[in-house]
Image (cartoon, coloured by chain):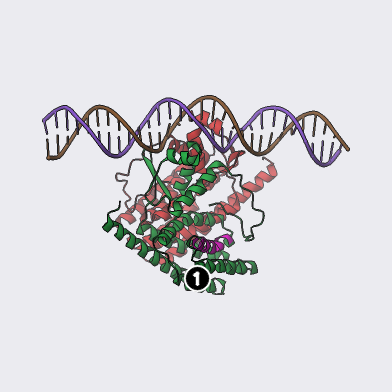
Chain colours: A red, B green, C purple, D brown
Amino acid sequence: MRSLAPASFGHSIERLNKSTLRDHIVERLRAAILSGELPPGAPVVETVLAARFAVSRGPLREALRQLVDEGLLVTVPYTGTHVISLSVEDVREIYSMRVTLERFAFEQAWQRRDAAFREEMLRRHRHLTAAIDAGDDRASILAELDLHGLVYEASGHRLLQRAWSSLRGRLQLYWAAHHRAHAIRGPRRDSHDSYIAAALGGDLPAMLAEIGEHMRRGAEQTEGFLRAQLMDRENGQEA
Amino acid sequence: MRSLAPASFGHSIERLNKSTLRDHIVERLRAAILSGELPPGAPVVETVLAARFAVSRGPLREALRQLVDEGLLVTVPYTGTHVISLSVEDVREIYSMRVTLERFAFEQAWQRRDAAFREEMLRRHRHLTAAIDAGDDRASILAELDLHGLVYEASGHRLLQRAWSSLRGRLQLYWAAHHRAHAIRGPRRDSHDSYIAAALGGDLPAMLAEIGEHMRRGAEQTEGFLRAQLMDRENGQEA
DNA sequence: CAATAGTTGATTGTTGACAATCTAACGACG
DNA sequence: CGTCGTTAGATTGTCAACAATCAACTATTG
Protein backbone atom coordinates (compact mmCIF):
# COMPACT_ATOMS: atom_id res chain seq x y z
CA MET A 1 0.00 0.00 0.00
CA ARG A 2 2.98 2.30 0.26
CA SER A 3 4.81 2.62 -3.06
CA LEU A 4 4.68 6.33 -3.55
CA ALA A 5 7.89 6.87 -5.49
CA PRO A 6 6.91 9.56 -7.99
CA ALA A 7 7.90 8.89 -11.57
CA SER A 8 11.14 7.03 -10.84
CA PHE A 9 10.78 3.39 -11.84
CA GLY A 10 14.26 2.16 -11.00
CA HIS A 11 14.09 1.25 -7.33
CA SER A 12 16.49 3.98 -6.34
CA ILE A 13 17.05 4.69 -2.66
CA GLU A 14 13.50 4.53 -1.38
CA ARG A 15 13.09 5.90 2.15
CA LEU A 16 13.65 2.81 4.28
CA ASN A 17 10.50 1.95 6.14
CA LYS A 18 11.35 1.28 9.76
CA SER A 19 9.40 -1.89 10.07
CA THR A 20 7.15 -1.90 13.07
CA LEU A 21 5.55 -5.10 14.28
CA ARG A 22 2.22 -4.03 12.91
CA ASP A 23 3.54 -3.67 9.37
CA HIS A 24 5.09 -7.10 9.58
CA ILE A 25 1.83 -8.64 10.72
CA VAL A 26 -0.11 -6.84 8.01
CA GLU A 27 2.11 -8.34 5.34
CA ARG A 28 1.93 -11.84 6.72
CA LEU A 29 -1.82 -11.66 7.23
CA ARG A 30 -2.40 -10.29 3.77
CA ALA A 31 -0.27 -13.09 2.35
CA ALA A 32 -2.27 -15.62 4.37
CA ILE A 33 -5.55 -14.23 3.05
CA LEU A 34 -4.43 -14.04 -0.55
CA SER A 35 -2.88 -17.50 -0.48
CA GLY A 36 -6.15 -18.99 0.66
CA GLU A 37 -4.79 -20.02 4.03
CA LEU A 38 -7.49 -17.73 5.40
CA PRO A 39 -10.22 -18.24 2.80
CA PRO A 40 -13.03 -15.72 2.18
CA GLY A 41 -15.56 -15.83 4.99
CA ALA A 42 -13.16 -17.37 7.49
CA PRO A 43 -13.32 -16.03 11.05
CA VAL A 44 -10.31 -14.11 12.26
CA VAL A 45 -9.93 -14.02 16.03
CA GLU A 46 -7.36 -11.80 17.60
CA THR A 47 -6.22 -14.16 20.34
CA VAL A 48 -5.39 -17.13 18.11
CA LEU A 49 -3.52 -14.98 15.60
CA ALA A 50 -1.65 -13.23 18.38
CA ALA A 51 -0.57 -16.62 19.68
CA ARG A 52 0.27 -17.85 16.18
CA PHE A 53 2.48 -14.85 15.43
CA ALA A 54 3.84 -14.79 18.98
CA VAL A 55 2.90 -11.17 19.53
CA SER A 56 0.52 -9.31 21.78
CA ARG A 57 -2.98 -8.36 20.73
CA GLY A 58 -2.12 -4.67 20.49
CA PRO A 59 -0.12 -4.63 17.27
CA LEU A 60 -2.31 -7.40 15.90
CA ARG A 61 -5.46 -5.33 16.44
CA GLU A 62 -3.93 -2.43 14.56
CA ALA A 63 -2.95 -4.74 11.74
CA LEU A 64 -6.50 -6.06 11.53
CA ARG A 65 -7.80 -2.51 11.52
CA GLN A 66 -5.60 -1.66 8.57
CA LEU A 67 -6.74 -4.72 6.63
CA VAL A 68 -10.32 -3.69 7.35
CA ASP A 69 -9.58 -0.30 5.81
CA GLU A 70 -8.07 -2.07 2.81
CA GLY A 71 -11.31 -3.95 2.45
CA LEU A 72 -9.93 -7.44 3.05
CA LEU A 73 -11.58 -7.92 6.44
CA VAL A 74 -14.86 -6.88 8.03
CA THR A 75 -15.39 -6.35 11.75
CA VAL A 76 -18.54 -6.05 13.79
CA PRO A 77 -17.85 -4.57 17.25
CA TYR A 78 -17.70 -6.93 20.22
CA THR A 79 -18.56 -9.82 17.92
CA GLY A 80 -15.82 -10.77 15.53
CA THR A 81 -13.76 -10.24 12.42
CA HIS A 82 -14.03 -12.20 9.16
CA VAL A 83 -12.31 -12.33 5.82
CA ILE A 84 -14.61 -10.67 3.31
CA SER A 85 -16.86 -12.90 1.26
CA LEU A 86 -16.74 -12.93 -2.52
CA SER A 87 -19.66 -11.40 -4.39
CA VAL A 88 -20.43 -10.71 -8.01
CA GLU A 89 -21.53 -7.22 -7.08
CA ASP A 90 -18.05 -6.51 -5.73
CA VAL A 91 -16.48 -7.80 -8.94
CA ARG A 92 -18.57 -5.37 -10.97
CA GLU A 93 -17.65 -2.50 -8.69
CA ILE A 94 -13.97 -3.35 -8.70
CA TYR A 95 -13.77 -3.51 -12.47
CA SER A 96 -15.89 -0.46 -13.16
CA MET A 97 -13.73 1.44 -10.73
CA ARG A 98 -10.63 0.14 -12.46
CA VAL A 99 -11.88 1.47 -15.78
CA THR A 100 -12.40 4.90 -14.25
CA LEU A 101 -9.10 5.07 -12.40
CA GLU A 102 -6.92 3.57 -15.09
CA ARG A 103 -8.33 5.85 -17.78
CA PHE A 104 -7.59 8.80 -15.53
CA ALA A 105 -4.09 7.44 -14.89
CA PHE A 106 -3.36 7.19 -18.60
CA GLU A 107 -4.67 10.68 -19.21
CA GLN A 108 -2.32 11.97 -16.53
CA ALA A 109 0.67 9.93 -17.66
CA TRP A 110 0.18 10.17 -21.43
CA GLN A 111 2.59 13.03 -21.99
CA ARG A 112 5.11 11.61 -19.55
CA ARG A 113 5.72 8.37 -21.40
CA ASP A 114 9.43 8.71 -22.04
CA ALA A 115 11.93 6.05 -23.07
CA ALA A 116 12.30 4.80 -19.49
CA PHE A 117 8.54 4.32 -19.28
CA ARG A 118 8.33 2.31 -22.49
CA GLU A 119 11.28 0.18 -21.50
CA GLU A 120 9.84 -0.50 -18.05
CA MET A 121 6.45 -1.40 -19.47
CA LEU A 122 7.97 -3.86 -21.91
CA ARG A 123 10.06 -5.31 -19.14
CA ARG A 124 7.03 -5.88 -16.92
CA HIS A 125 5.16 -7.35 -19.85
CA ARG A 126 7.98 -9.83 -20.38
CA HIS A 127 7.82 -10.71 -16.71
CA LEU A 128 4.11 -11.36 -16.99
CA THR A 129 4.34 -13.57 -20.07
CA ALA A 130 7.25 -15.46 -18.54
CA ALA A 131 5.28 -16.12 -15.37
CA ILE A 132 2.26 -17.24 -17.36
CA ASP A 133 4.34 -19.54 -19.56
CA ALA A 134 6.03 -20.96 -16.48
CA GLY A 135 2.60 -21.72 -15.04
CA ASP A 136 3.40 -19.82 -11.88
CA ASP A 137 0.03 -18.54 -10.74
CA ARG A 138 1.22 -16.44 -7.84
CA ALA A 139 3.95 -14.79 -9.88
CA SER A 140 1.66 -14.08 -12.81
CA ILE A 141 -0.86 -12.35 -10.56
CA LEU A 142 1.83 -10.16 -9.06
CA ALA A 143 3.28 -9.48 -12.49
CA GLU A 144 -0.07 -8.42 -13.87
CA LEU A 145 -0.66 -6.11 -10.91
CA ASP A 146 2.81 -4.66 -11.41
CA LEU A 147 2.19 -4.14 -15.10
CA HIS A 148 -1.00 -2.21 -14.51
CA GLY A 149 0.59 -0.44 -11.57
CA LEU A 150 3.18 1.19 -13.79
CA VAL A 151 0.82 3.74 -15.23
CA TYR A 152 -0.27 4.79 -11.77
CA GLU A 153 3.35 5.31 -10.77
CA ALA A 154 3.95 7.26 -13.95
CA SER A 155 0.94 9.47 -13.31
CA GLY A 156 2.76 11.06 -10.39
CA HIS A 157 -0.64 11.42 -8.74
CA ARG A 158 -0.33 10.31 -5.12
CA LEU A 159 -4.05 10.25 -4.44
CA LEU A 160 -4.57 8.14 -7.52
CA GLN A 161 -1.82 5.79 -6.42
CA ARG A 162 -3.52 5.39 -3.06
CA ALA A 163 -6.81 4.60 -4.74
CA TRP A 164 -5.10 1.96 -6.88
CA SER A 165 -3.43 0.44 -3.82
CA SER A 166 -6.81 0.22 -2.18
CA LEU A 167 -8.29 -1.58 -5.18
CA ARG A 168 -5.26 -3.75 -5.67
CA GLY A 169 -5.76 -5.85 -2.55
CA ARG A 170 -9.34 -6.71 -3.37
CA LEU A 171 -8.49 -7.50 -6.96
CA GLN A 172 -5.65 -9.74 -5.86
CA LEU A 173 -8.02 -11.58 -3.54
CA TYR A 174 -10.43 -12.39 -6.34
CA TRP A 175 -7.70 -13.41 -8.75
CA ALA A 176 -6.09 -15.63 -6.14
CA ALA A 177 -9.40 -17.36 -5.47
CA HIS A 178 -9.92 -17.74 -9.20
CA HIS A 179 -6.52 -19.26 -9.81
CA ARG A 180 -6.91 -21.58 -6.85
CA ALA A 181 -10.22 -22.88 -8.16
CA HIS A 182 -8.93 -23.74 -11.63
CA ALA A 183 -5.65 -22.63 -13.13
CA ILE A 184 -6.27 -20.22 -15.97
CA ARG A 185 -3.90 -19.48 -18.79
CA GLY A 186 -3.86 -18.70 -22.47
CA PRO A 187 -6.18 -15.88 -23.46
CA ARG A 188 -4.60 -13.48 -21.03
CA ARG A 189 -1.48 -13.13 -23.16
CA ASP A 190 -3.25 -11.86 -26.24
CA SER A 191 -5.35 -9.60 -24.09
CA HIS A 192 -2.26 -7.89 -22.78
CA ASP A 193 -0.53 -7.77 -26.16
CA SER A 194 -3.19 -5.41 -27.49
CA TYR A 195 -3.16 -3.52 -24.20
CA ILE A 196 0.57 -2.92 -24.39
CA ALA A 197 0.40 -1.93 -28.02
CA ALA A 198 -2.19 0.73 -27.31
CA ALA A 199 -0.41 1.90 -24.17
CA LEU A 200 2.79 2.53 -26.10
CA GLY A 201 1.03 3.95 -29.18
CA GLY A 202 0.11 7.53 -29.93
CA ASP A 203 -3.67 7.39 -29.82
CA LEU A 204 -5.01 8.24 -26.37
CA PRO A 205 -8.72 7.72 -27.18
CA ALA A 206 -7.81 4.29 -28.56
CA MET A 207 -6.09 3.49 -25.27
CA LEU A 208 -9.11 4.63 -23.27
CA ALA A 209 -11.27 2.34 -25.38
CA GLU A 210 -8.79 -0.51 -24.95
CA ILE A 211 -8.99 -0.10 -21.18
CA GLY A 212 -12.74 -0.51 -21.36
CA GLU A 213 -12.40 -3.64 -23.47
CA HIS A 214 -9.65 -5.08 -21.32
CA MET A 215 -11.66 -4.61 -18.14
CA ARG A 216 -14.81 -5.94 -19.75
CA ARG A 217 -12.99 -9.16 -20.57
CA GLY A 218 -11.46 -9.36 -17.11
CA ALA A 219 -14.73 -8.72 -15.33
CA GLU A 220 -16.47 -11.29 -17.50
CA GLN A 221 -13.88 -13.92 -16.69
CA THR A 222 -13.79 -13.23 -12.98
CA GLU A 223 -17.54 -12.91 -12.66
CA GLY A 224 -18.06 -16.13 -14.57
CA PHE A 225 -15.75 -18.02 -12.27
CA LEU A 226 -17.44 -16.57 -9.24
CA ARG A 227 -20.93 -17.50 -10.42
CA ALA A 228 -19.77 -21.06 -11.03
CA GLN A 229 -18.16 -21.27 -7.62
CA LEU A 230 -21.18 -19.86 -5.83
CA MET A 231 -23.41 -22.31 -7.67
CA ASP A 232 -21.14 -25.20 -6.68
CA ARG A 233 -21.20 -24.09 -3.09
CA GLU A 234 -24.97 -23.89 -3.13
CA ASN A 235 -25.29 -27.41 -4.52
CA GLY A 236 -22.62 -28.83 -2.27
CA GLN A 237 -24.02 -27.02 0.77
CA GLU A 238 -20.55 -26.46 2.18
CA ALA A 239 -21.33 -23.48 4.42
CA MET B 1 -16.55 7.77 6.49
CA ARG B 2 -19.29 5.21 6.92
CA SER B 3 -22.52 6.27 5.22
CA LEU B 4 -23.14 3.33 2.95
CA ALA B 5 -26.91 3.42 2.75
CA PRO B 6 -27.57 2.41 -0.85
CA ALA B 7 -29.98 4.57 -2.75
CA SER B 8 -32.23 5.48 0.18
CA PHE B 9 -31.95 9.17 0.94
CA GLY B 10 -34.43 9.47 3.76
CA HIS B 11 -32.51 8.63 6.90
CA SER B 12 -34.55 5.49 7.47
CA ILE B 13 -33.48 3.03 10.12
CA GLU B 14 -29.73 2.90 9.50
CA ARG B 15 -27.96 0.02 11.28
CA LEU B 16 -27.15 1.51 14.61
CA ASN B 17 -23.38 1.75 14.99
CA LYS B 18 -22.38 0.38 18.34
CA SER B 19 -20.15 3.24 19.26
CA THR B 20 -16.75 2.09 20.38
CA LEU B 21 -14.39 4.46 22.12
CA ARG B 22 -12.19 4.63 19.05
CA ASP B 23 -15.03 5.87 16.86
CA HIS B 24 -15.87 8.54 19.38
CA ILE B 25 -12.28 9.72 19.49
CA VAL B 26 -12.03 9.72 15.70
CA GLU B 27 -15.01 12.04 15.45
CA ARG B 28 -13.77 14.42 18.09
CA LEU B 29 -10.26 14.48 16.67
CA ARG B 30 -11.51 15.03 13.15
CA ALA B 31 -13.65 17.88 14.42
CA ALA B 32 -10.65 19.35 16.22
CA ILE B 33 -8.55 19.17 13.08
CA LEU B 34 -11.21 20.61 10.80
CA SER B 35 -12.09 23.39 13.23
CA GLY B 36 -8.48 24.52 13.31
CA GLU B 37 -8.02 23.63 16.94
CA LEU B 38 -5.31 21.32 15.64
CA PRO B 39 -4.05 23.35 12.67
CA PRO B 40 -2.16 21.83 9.72
CA GLY B 41 1.35 20.84 10.74
CA ALA B 42 0.59 20.70 14.45
CA PRO B 43 2.16 17.84 16.39
CA VAL B 44 -0.20 15.23 17.74
CA VAL B 45 1.16 13.28 20.70
CA GLU B 46 -0.67 10.27 21.97
CA THR B 47 -0.12 10.87 25.68
CA VAL B 48 -1.48 14.40 25.81
CA LEU B 49 -4.54 13.51 23.75
CA ALA B 50 -5.15 10.42 25.85
CA ALA B 51 -5.07 12.60 28.94
CA ARG B 52 -7.25 15.25 27.29
CA PHE B 53 -9.93 12.75 26.31
CA ALA B 54 -9.51 10.81 29.55
CA VAL B 55 -8.91 7.51 27.81
CA SER B 56 -6.04 5.11 27.52
CA ARG B 57 -3.54 5.24 24.67
CA GLY B 58 -4.88 2.05 23.09
CA PRO B 59 -8.10 3.35 21.56
CA LEU B 60 -6.43 6.66 20.88
CA ARG B 61 -3.68 5.01 18.87
CA GLU B 62 -6.25 3.21 16.75
CA ALA B 63 -8.10 6.45 16.20
CA LEU B 64 -4.89 8.13 15.05
CA ARG B 65 -4.19 5.20 12.74
CA GLN B 66 -7.60 5.64 11.13
CA LEU B 67 -7.08 9.35 10.62
CA VAL B 68 -3.73 8.57 9.03
CA ASP B 69 -5.52 6.28 6.59
CA GLU B 70 -7.98 9.07 5.90
CA GLY B 71 -5.05 11.28 5.05
CA LEU B 72 -5.56 13.84 7.81
CA LEU B 73 -2.51 12.80 9.83
CA VAL B 74 0.97 11.54 9.03
CA THR B 75 3.06 9.36 11.31
CA VAL B 76 6.74 8.53 11.28
CA PRO B 77 7.54 5.52 13.48
CA TYR B 78 9.03 6.13 16.91
CA THR B 79 9.10 9.84 16.17
CA GLY B 80 5.71 11.45 16.10
CA THR B 81 2.43 12.22 14.42
CA HIS B 82 1.42 15.52 12.81
CA VAL B 83 -1.59 17.03 11.16
CA ILE B 84 -0.90 17.11 7.42
CA SER B 85 0.41 20.32 5.93
CA LEU B 86 -1.42 22.14 3.17
CA SER B 87 0.12 22.09 -0.30
CA VAL B 88 -0.95 23.34 -3.70
CA GLU B 89 0.02 20.00 -5.19
CA ASP B 90 -2.52 18.30 -2.93
CA VAL B 91 -5.20 20.77 -4.00
CA ARG B 92 -4.60 19.92 -7.63
CA GLU B 93 -4.73 16.22 -6.89
CA ILE B 94 -7.87 16.49 -4.81
CA TYR B 95 -9.76 18.42 -7.45
CA SER B 96 -8.58 16.37 -10.43
CA MET B 97 -9.61 13.29 -8.52
CA ARG B 98 -12.98 14.86 -7.78
CA VAL B 99 -13.56 15.45 -11.48
CA THR B 100 -12.83 11.82 -12.21
CA LEU B 101 -14.92 10.36 -9.41
CA GLU B 102 -17.88 12.69 -9.71
CA ARG B 103 -18.16 12.17 -13.45
CA PHE B 104 -18.15 8.44 -12.84
CA ALA B 105 -20.76 8.86 -10.13
CA PHE B 106 -23.08 10.78 -12.44
CA GLU B 107 -22.64 8.21 -15.18
CA GLN B 108 -23.64 5.51 -12.72
CA ALA B 109 -26.53 7.45 -11.22
CA TRP B 110 -27.86 9.13 -14.37
CA GLN B 111 -30.60 6.60 -15.06
CA ARG B 112 -31.55 6.35 -11.40
CA ARG B 113 -32.48 9.98 -10.96
CA ASP B 114 -36.08 9.53 -9.88
CA ALA B 115 -38.41 12.01 -8.24
CA ALA B 116 -36.95 11.32 -4.81
CA PHE B 117 -33.48 12.10 -6.12
CA ARG B 118 -34.53 15.41 -7.65
CA GLU B 119 -36.40 16.41 -4.55
CA GLU B 120 -33.47 15.54 -2.30
CA MET B 121 -31.01 17.42 -4.48
CA LEU B 122 -33.16 20.56 -4.41
CA ARG B 123 -33.57 20.19 -0.68
CA ARG B 124 -29.82 20.02 -0.12
CA HIS B 125 -29.30 22.93 -2.46
CA ARG B 126 -31.71 24.99 -0.38
CA HIS B 127 -29.79 24.01 2.73
CA LEU B 128 -26.55 25.16 1.13
CA THR B 129 -27.87 28.54 0.00
CA ALA B 130 -29.51 29.07 3.37
CA ALA B 131 -26.24 28.37 5.17
CA ILE B 132 -24.33 30.68 2.83
CA ASP B 133 -26.88 33.47 3.24
CA ALA B 134 -26.80 33.02 6.99
CA GLY B 135 -23.04 33.41 6.87
CA ASP B 136 -22.53 30.12 8.71
CA ASP B 137 -19.19 28.88 7.40
CA ARG B 138 -19.19 25.52 9.07
CA ALA B 139 -22.75 24.75 8.02
CA SER B 140 -22.15 25.80 4.45
CA ILE B 141 -19.12 23.54 4.13
CA LEU B 142 -21.08 20.59 5.43
CA ALA B 143 -24.02 21.48 3.20
CA GLU B 144 -21.83 21.63 0.12
CA LEU B 145 -20.26 18.28 0.95
CA ASP B 146 -23.71 16.82 1.46
CA LEU B 147 -24.91 18.24 -1.83
CA HIS B 148 -22.10 16.67 -3.79
CA GLY B 149 -22.38 13.51 -1.71
CA LEU B 150 -25.88 12.86 -2.96
CA VAL B 151 -24.79 11.63 -6.36
CA TYR B 152 -22.38 9.19 -4.76
CA GLU B 153 -25.17 7.81 -2.62
CA ALA B 154 -27.40 7.57 -5.66
CA SER B 155 -24.74 5.72 -7.63
CA GLY B 156 -25.21 2.68 -5.40
CA HIS B 157 -21.49 2.02 -5.88
CA ARG B 158 -19.98 1.20 -2.50
CA LEU B 159 -16.39 1.39 -3.65
CA LEU B 160 -17.06 4.78 -5.17
CA GLN B 161 -18.70 5.94 -1.96
CA ARG B 162 -15.63 4.87 -0.01
CA ALA B 163 -13.41 6.78 -2.40
CA TRP B 164 -15.55 9.88 -1.94
CA SER B 165 -15.43 9.51 1.84
CA SER B 166 -11.67 9.35 1.62
CA LEU B 167 -11.50 12.54 -0.43
CA ARG B 168 -14.13 14.28 1.64
CA GLY B 169 -11.99 14.65 4.75
CA ARG B 170 -9.09 16.24 2.93
CA LEU B 171 -11.38 18.55 1.00
CA GLN B 172 -13.09 19.60 4.19
CA LEU B 173 -9.71 20.38 5.73
CA TYR B 174 -8.77 22.73 2.92
CA TRP B 175 -12.13 24.43 2.87
CA ALA B 176 -12.07 24.88 6.63
CA ALA B 177 -8.64 26.48 6.45
CA HIS B 178 -9.85 28.67 3.60
CA HIS B 179 -12.93 29.88 5.43
CA ARG B 180 -10.93 30.46 8.58
CA ALA B 181 -8.45 32.67 6.71
CA HIS B 182 -11.07 34.93 5.12
CA ALA B 183 -14.78 34.27 4.99
CA ILE B 184 -15.86 33.64 1.41
CA ARG B 185 -19.31 34.08 0.02
CA GLY B 186 -21.03 35.19 -3.10
CA PRO B 187 -19.90 33.46 -6.26
CA ARG B 188 -20.48 30.03 -4.83
CA ARG B 189 -24.25 30.37 -5.21
CA ASP B 190 -24.24 30.96 -8.93
CA SER B 191 -21.72 28.22 -9.38
CA HIS B 192 -24.04 25.73 -7.80
CA ASP B 193 -27.08 27.03 -9.61
CA SER B 194 -25.67 25.95 -12.95
CA TYR B 195 -24.44 22.75 -11.38
CA ILE B 196 -27.89 21.85 -10.11
CA ALA B 197 -29.54 22.78 -13.38
CA ALA B 198 -27.27 20.43 -15.33
CA ALA B 199 -27.54 17.68 -12.72
CA LEU B 200 -31.32 17.65 -13.01
CA GLY B 201 -31.35 18.13 -16.77
CA GLY B 202 -31.34 15.51 -19.49
CA ASP B 203 -27.95 16.06 -21.06
CA LEU B 204 -25.30 13.82 -19.50
CA PRO B 205 -22.34 15.13 -21.55
CA ALA B 206 -23.32 18.65 -20.52
CA MET B 207 -23.26 17.55 -16.89
CA LEU B 208 -19.82 15.98 -17.31
CA ALA B 209 -18.58 19.24 -18.78
CA GLU B 210 -20.22 21.20 -15.97
CA ILE B 211 -18.37 19.06 -13.42
CA GLY B 212 -15.10 19.97 -15.08
CA GLU B 213 -15.96 23.65 -14.99
CA HIS B 214 -17.23 23.52 -11.43
CA MET B 215 -14.06 21.84 -10.20
CA ARG B 216 -11.84 24.14 -12.20
CA ARG B 217 -13.41 27.12 -10.44
CA GLY B 218 -13.17 25.44 -7.05
CA ALA B 219 -9.55 24.44 -7.53
CA GLU B 220 -8.67 27.92 -8.71
CA GLN B 221 -10.26 29.50 -5.65
CA THR B 222 -8.74 27.08 -3.15
CA GLU B 223 -5.32 27.11 -4.77
CA GLY B 224 -5.32 30.88 -4.90
CA PHE B 225 -6.10 31.15 -1.22
CA LEU B 226 -3.39 28.63 -0.41
CA ARG B 227 -0.74 30.44 -2.43
CA ALA B 228 -1.58 33.67 -0.65
CA GLN B 229 -1.45 32.02 2.73
CA LEU B 230 1.87 30.30 2.02
CA MET B 231 3.31 33.60 0.83
CA ASP B 232 2.10 35.33 3.98
CA ARG B 233 3.65 32.65 6.11
CA GLU B 234 6.94 32.96 4.28
CA ASN B 235 7.03 36.70 4.81
CA GLY B 236 5.90 36.47 8.41
CA GLN B 237 8.31 33.62 9.17
CA GLU B 238 5.83 31.99 11.47
CA ALA B 239 7.06 28.38 11.23
C1' DC C 1 -44.93 -27.19 21.67
C1' DA C 2 -43.63 -22.15 21.18
C1' DA C 3 -41.80 -18.32 23.25
C1' DT C 4 -39.09 -16.13 26.50
C1' DA C 5 -35.81 -15.39 30.23
C1' DG C 6 -31.44 -16.74 32.15
C1' DT C 7 -26.77 -18.56 31.78
C1' DT C 8 -22.41 -19.51 29.87
C1' DG C 9 -18.47 -19.41 26.97
C1' DA C 10 -16.18 -16.79 23.65
C1' DT C 11 -14.52 -12.47 21.60
C1' DT C 12 -13.50 -7.90 21.38
C1' DG C 13 -12.77 -3.34 23.98
C1' DT C 14 -9.90 -0.99 27.36
C1' DT C 15 -6.29 -0.09 30.53
C1' DG C 16 -1.76 1.05 32.74
C1' DA C 17 2.99 -0.26 32.90
C1' DC C 18 7.29 -1.34 30.52
C1' DA C 19 10.57 -1.50 26.43
C1' DA C 20 12.56 0.26 22.09
C1' DT C 21 13.69 4.05 19.38
C1' DC C 22 14.36 8.71 17.90
C1' DT C 23 15.69 13.76 18.21
C1' DA C 24 18.15 17.35 20.00
C1' DA C 25 21.28 19.26 23.21
C1' DC C 26 25.84 18.89 25.19
C1' DG C 27 30.61 18.34 25.50
C1' DA C 28 35.11 16.14 24.06
C1' DC C 29 38.37 16.14 20.51
C1' DG C 30 40.96 17.04 16.26
C1' DC D 1 35.88 26.30 14.80
C1' DG D 2 33.74 22.24 13.07
C1' DT D 3 32.83 17.35 13.77
C1' DC D 4 31.65 13.36 16.10
C1' DG D 5 30.32 10.51 20.10
C1' DT D 6 27.38 10.64 24.32
C1' DT D 7 23.57 11.41 26.92
C1' DA D 8 18.95 12.83 28.34
C1' DG D 9 14.32 13.64 27.45
C1' DA D 10 10.43 12.67 24.89
C1' DT D 11 7.55 9.76 22.01
C1' DT D 12 5.95 5.77 20.10
C1' DG D 13 5.91 0.51 20.20
C1' DT D 14 4.61 -3.53 22.85
C1' DC D 15 2.74 -6.32 26.39
C1' DA D 16 -0.34 -8.92 29.65
C1' DA D 17 -4.35 -8.45 32.63
C1' DC D 18 -9.12 -6.85 33.24
C1' DA D 19 -13.83 -5.28 31.73
C1' DA D 20 -17.79 -4.99 28.54
C1' DT D 21 -20.46 -7.11 25.20
C1' DC D 22 -22.39 -10.59 22.35
C1' DA D 23 -24.25 -15.13 20.38
C1' DA D 24 -25.79 -19.53 21.30
C1' DC D 25 -27.55 -22.73 24.28
C1' DT D 26 -30.61 -24.28 28.06
C1' DA D 27 -34.28 -24.33 30.94
C1' DT D 28 -38.54 -22.61 32.25
C1' DT D 29 -43.19 -21.28 31.58
C1' DG D 30 -47.61 -20.51 29.40
Residue B95 on image: x %, y %:
42, 62
Residue B21 on image: x %, y %:
55, 41
Q: Is residue A220 above or below residue D29?
A: below
**Residue of label 1:** B192
Q: Nearer the viewer, residue A128 or A104?
A: A104
Indicate the quadrant where residue D10 lies: top left
Region in magenta: B139-153
The answer, for residue B145, to whether it is visible in the render is: yes
Residue B215 on image: x %, y %:
44, 66
Q: Amino acid at mark 1?
A: His
> Which secondary structure type mostly characterizes the magenta part of the structure?
helix
Indicate the quadrant where residue D7 lies: top left
Residue A66 on image: x %, y %:
49, 43
The answer, for residue A55, to whether it is visible in the render is: no
Chain that bears disc 1? B
Q: How many marks?
A: 1
Q: Residues within 10 Å of mark 1 (few under 14, many from 20)?
A: some
Residue occupying image coordinates x 26% and y 58%: B235
Task: Say if the magenta span includes residue B148.
Answer: yes
Q: Nearer the viewer, residue A130 or A109?
A: A109
Report the side of B86 relative to A179 (left or right). Answer: left
Task: Say if the magenta span includes residue B144.
Answer: yes
Secondary-structure class at tag 1: helix
Q: Nearer the viewer, residue A21 or A175?
A: A21
